[in-house]
Amino acid sequence: MHQRKITRRSFLKSASIAAAAPAIIPASALGRDGNTAPSERIVMASIGVGGQGMHNTRAFFSMPDVQLVAVCDVDRHHCAAARDTVDEYYAARPSYGERGNCSAYHDFREVLARDDIDAVMIGTPDHWHGAMSVAAARAGKDIYCEKPLANSIPEGRAVVDAVRQYQRVFQTGSHERSRDNARYACELVRNGRIGKLHTIRVQMPVDHGWGETYPEMPVPDHFDYDFWLGPAREAPYTEMRCHFYFRYILDYSGGEMTDRGAHIIDLGQLGNDTDHTMPISVSGTGKFPTEGLFNTAYEYEFEFEYANGVRLVGDHSGPRGVRFEGDEGWVFIHVHGGNLEAEPTSLLREAITPNEIHLGRSRGHHYDFLECVKSRGETKAPAEVGHHSGSMCHMANIAMLLNKKLRWDPQTEQFDDAAANRMMQPSMRAPWTL
């Protein structure tokens, strides 16, 4: 919480001086009757409020511990709708106390310049994650940023370094790892209930078409397209390039690999007890469109090898999720939803005993972030964890584009191949840098 906000003690003292008769102080100001005192609220802003960004915004402003004071988007329609939604929510809930008058911004740097803001939610397209997260850390903000952590491996490392240097709390938006079922399944694996783990099988069906060419269009008056492109190279505007569909264009994202793959591979990391590192090799083959706007892979097979001998293999089959295979059984986590399957089925009725490995639980991914902002503890998906999971997605895409096996050094974060190392370097359009 911001240290310059009024404390309960100073509030009561000033109230008593200002009034000749005893003042009637609302319970919301004192933190009673289930309310959170103003001095204990986390003041937040949302940057990028379309799609998933608005989902995260709703999750945060509906929590009594949060006062959401600003929204920011280069699409004025998104920004105005988000601001109105926040103000209407607070206006309809007098028990939340004096909250409202949410400010709307076009430029995220104006948000970061406000010294009353404790934390930001970044829900922009992937190609903005790195630069904005680094800037937010430098500005002294705690950060909840959607997955993948960044749009390249070096950008991810820059985020980790900035978060560490400025001692910020960071939550990667890999919310699947906060589901109770997913954590329970990973506990079964890490406690040897399926025997010795040997294979992690990732299934990621692609549910989008390719090959369409879309004509150049006039940029709408309400949309700052040049700012949306930001660090990405110039490209003609068409509505199918932006908002939801950016994820199927390599300049801005990595397709299914960095979309749902960032969730599923992340769960593989958790179950394999390799959050702290990455694999030592990657290979892959993929089919990429030869025409049309979208250019991410629509069919793929990839394989990672870990130093502990475990293999993580993936393809475009379904159902979407991750299966941990051991020499005595297997357990499958469905994504999204977190439903579990296992063989033997009796695995799912087993309790994790007090002396075994426990991965902890939370009230949810967003609550976990808020609690860590207060405690200064580590979130369920800190920057280093998000960097490793996101980097694996980029590694797979690079291996598929080169159609070859690559050795990887988790310490130096370099391939054994010059072409692969060149491909992972970010290309940022001036004036944007990390």
Image (cartoon, rainbow, N blue to C red):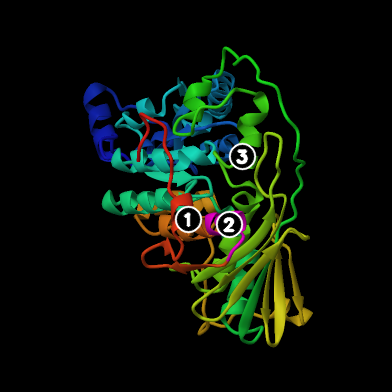
Element type where label 1 sits in the image:
helix
> What is the secondary structure assignment of the residue under circle 3?
loop
For the magenta stretch, what is the residue range? 393-404
Q: Residues within 10 Å of mark 2 (few under 14, many from 20)?
A: some
Which residue is tagged 3?
A: 249
Q: Position of residue 426 (x, y in %)?
A: 43, 44
Identify the mark at residue 419; answer none if there is no mark.
Answer: 1
Q: Is residue 401 magenta?
A: yes
Count of marks placed on residues: 3
Neighbor class of circle 3 (other Cα within 10 Å; few <14, some 14-19, many 20+) is some
Kindly indicate whether the residue at mark 1 contacts the one at mark 2 (C-beta within 8 angstroms): yes
Residue 238 point in image, percent of width and height: 65, 23
Mark found first going from the N terminus, 1 or 3: 3
Query: Distance of mark 1 from mark 3, alpha carbons?
Result: 21 Å
Query: In the drawing, does residue 30 fall left or right of residue 165?
Result: right
Q: Position of residue 359 (x, y in %)?
A: 52, 70
Which of the image's four quarters has the N terminus? top left
Q: Which mark is residue 24?
A: none
- In this figure, which residue is indicated by the disc labeled 2? 402
- Which residue is pictured at 65% across the width and 46% down the height? 296
**In the rendered image of this protein, does residue 216 appear above or below residue 409?**
above
Does the magenta portion include 137? no
Residue type at mark 3: give it.
Answer: Ile
CA gap, disc 2 and disc 1 = 8 Å
Q: Residue at x 60, y 22 (%)?
A: 237
